[in-house]
Amino acid sequence: MDAASLTDRYLDAAMRTVPERQRADLSAELRASIADQVDARIDSGEDAAAAERAVLTDLGDPDVLAAGYTGRVLHLIGPRYYLDWWRLLKLLLWIVPVCAAFGIALGQLIAQAPIGTVIGQAVVGALWSIVQVSFWTTLVFVVLERLGHETMDAGRWTPDRLPLPRERGARFGDLVVSLVWLLLVAGAVVWDHVLGLAYANGSWMPVFDPALWPWGMAALFVILAAFAVVSVRVYQRGGWSYGLAAVHGILDVILFGAVIWLLVEGRLLNPALVSALTDATSAEVPRILGVLLGLGLAAIGVWDILDAVLKAGRARARS
Amino acid sequence: MGDDETLDTHLQELRRGTVVLACLRLLTTPGYGYGLLEELAARGFATDANTLYPLLRRLEKQGYLRSEWNTDEARPRKFYRTSATGETLARSLTADFRAIADAIARLPEGD
């Protein structure tokens, strides 16, 4: 290979990313510097071709050298924006895929898609939203890194920005709140059976299927009592443990699973109420209400399980 | 192996600013890329060509160096010379370097 052509090729490669108006000047200077270095090596007895090769090897990747001249950044997202990018991406990835999956599942259920399709579409939607959110967030920060220099600056960090201590769910107030909730649920169920919580066709009637009494509702009270025991244990221990979170999660799965199963089977709601609703509106209304109710219950159940596990994780991280 | 690498990194970090100071003081007499590279090496400021050449451009852009093409010789070369603001910068860098050297001399010596 011709030695002169190697320098030419190096200069071509290095000048590719240099702005037009600096190119001639930089290229001439770099060519002279390379020639000087090559001459020095030849004077000390090296072969011309080997000298050329050695000098260019020392100069290294022409694009890196050019970046040194032009101040071009050689990273996608540098330290200036990295943390902002990472925090925003984490936040969005907590919110968007969940909302996307939930929305898609809701739409598919209302459209009466088979359950396999509902799950498949929701999973595909969540994955697709992860790809989209990651790509566009990153793209915005890559552009900011190259153009915007002051736009993202949220000012100097001060200790006021430290995150507040997070809920551990172990104070006396937490215990009272959860016990009151359980009593309210139990009270509402009894009230519903005795007096009725729904008003239709000029009279009060129960929302829940009276056929669930006594055994179905007895099972509900047992589960509510078990929840109460877990709450008391959490308060006594001074925090959640993974064991308590697991018991709490199993109770959630039994309770919400049973309620949703009964809903799907058409055995949860009072048939008299459903037929009254169908008469007053159309058959579609109870069905869509059922879908909304079922998904809402599923979302609450999942959140309740996650909340306990997260609190257990925090309690462990602290001790 | 790893120890040598971290040692090199620390030495590089310690020397980084001194090359700027050496360039500003040497270029009170005009010089060109390769000639300066040799002189720096001879005076104990060993520098890589791919560090020095972009550095000269940067200092010129910041106004600490002036440049001029010399076409008198067979090989045209770009000559750099320290500007007035460059000399001021060199003086404050030198003063700061002395202050650091004094401060280091007063540090407790572990043996």
Image: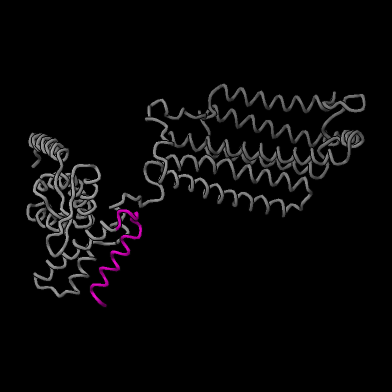
The residue nearer to you, when weighing A137 against B27, is: B27
The quarter of the displayed image where residue A181 is located? top right
Image coords of residue B66 (percent x, y): 18, 46
- Picture coordinates of residue A211 (x, y %)? 86, 36
Image x and y of residue A240, in percent: 53, 33
For the record, the magenta segment spans A1-23
Instruction: Say whether residue A268 is magenta.
Output: no
Residue A184 seen in the figure: yes
In the displayed structure image, the side of residue B64 where residue A222 appears, left or right: right
Q: Report whether A217 appears left or right of A90.
A: right
A7 or A258: which is nearer to us?
A7
In reply to whether residue A13 is colored magenta, the answer given is: yes
Give the quarter of the image for residue B82. Answer: top left
Which quadrant is the N terminus of chain A positioned in?
Answer: bottom left
Residue under the point 54% across and 29% down: A169
Observer-nearest of A219 and A96:
A96
The quadrant the C terminus of chain A occupies is: top left
